Amino acid sequence: MVEFNLQNPWVFVPVMVVIWAVIWAAIGMLLFDKQGSHQLFIGGMGGLAFGLMTVYLRRNEWKTPKNDS
């Protein structure tokens, strides 16, 4: 079974992009009556920026330990 671990930056960033895009599109379409594709793009870019900045700021916590044995 594949383990779903948000501590892995390669999993964390795409998950953030999807979450931001869906939420941003829903808010844009429901509250502001905007076009959905544009809202998905803007939300995806926001999620990408958030995910990459989080990975950058937490880079020391997410480094894999080296095995010296």
Image: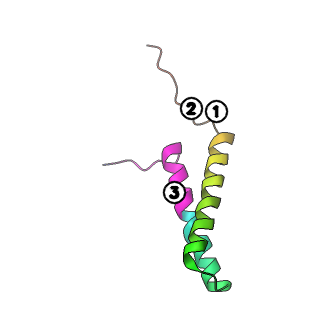
Image: 68 above or below 22: above
Quadrant of residue 28 in the image? bottom right
Residue 21 vs 2, above or below: the answer is: below
* Between discs 1 and 3, the one toward the N terminus: 3
Disc ID at residue 15: 3
- Number of residues whose C-alpha sits closer than 10 Å to that of mark 1, classed few (under 14), some (14–19) or many (20 or more): few
Q: Residue at x 50, y 22 (%)?
A: 66
Residue at 56% x, 32% y: name it: 63
Q: Quadrant of residue 59?
A: top right
In what element is the residue under mark 2? loop
Q: Which residues are magenta?
A: 2-18
Label 3: element kind: helix
Which quadrant would residue 19 be assigned to in this image?
bottom right
* Residue designated by label 1: 60
> Which residue is drawn at the image coordinates 59% and 80% (left, top)?
35
Return the mark for residue 63. 2
CB-based contact (under 8 Å), mark 1 and mark 3: no
For marks 2 and 3, the one nearer the N-term is 3
Which residue: 68% across, 84% down? 32
Does 68 sit left or right of 47 as displayed? Answer: left
